[in-house]
Amino acid sequence: MDFLEDLEAYNSSMENAYMLVTKRMTLDDIYELMEDGEVSEFYLPFDPMDGDGRDDSTIDLLIEYFISVEEYEKCQELVTLRNKFLGGQ
């Protein structure tokens, strides 16, 4: 992979994690997309077999990422989710 491919994979992993953490997508949805050939690779910044990404470190990572790309609506949703399920900070 070159730098641009790495960057694209990183951006994709953040978007994918957002979809899973906010329950807009499930692991079953991912498997279906892969089986149907709609996607060949699906990146995540966490291991979906160890958890659903609703932990402090993953949510903080996502918030920092979406701040950096100025997607503040997603940041607010993640902060609300963290406060509701993890007790906030």
Image: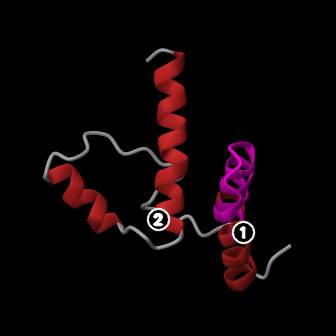
Which residue matches tag 2? 20
Side of 32 relative to 20 (left or right): left
Residue at image coords 22%, 55%: 33
Q: 19 or 89: nearer the eye?
A: 19
Q: Which mark is residue 76?
A: 1
Q: Position of residue 66 (x, y in %)?
A: 67, 51
Q: Residue at x 50, y 45 (%)?
A: 13
Q: Which span of residues is magenta-colored?
A: 59-76
Viewer-closest of 6 and 52: 6
User: Horizontally, is 60 left or right of 28 in the view?
Assistant: right
**Horizontal side of residue 3 vs 67, given as left or right:** left
Q: Which label was assigned to residue 53?
A: none
Amino acid at pointer 1: Gln
Secondary structure mostly seen in magenta is helix
Residue 49 spot, x, y in % from top left? 42, 61
Q: CA distance from mark 1 to mark 2?
A: 16 Å
Callout 1: helix, strand or loop? helix
Against 20, is 64 above or below? above
Q: Verify whether residue 71 appears in magenta.
A: yes
Q: How many marks?
A: 2
Whole-percent x, y for residue 27 in the image: 34, 65
Image quadrant occupied by the N terminus: top left
87, above or below 6, in the image: below
What is the residue that sits farthest to the right in this orientation? 89
How would you rate the neighbour count of disc 2 (Cα within 10 Å): few for under 14, some for 14-19, many for 20 or more? many
Q: Is residue 40 visible?
A: yes
At x 68%, y 47%, the residue is 65
Residue drawn at x 86%, y 73% is 89
Could you tell me if residue 51 is visible in this image? no
Number of other residues with Cα within 10 Å of mark 1, as a class: few under 14, some 14 to 19, many 20 or more: some
Q: Secondary structure at mark 2?
A: helix
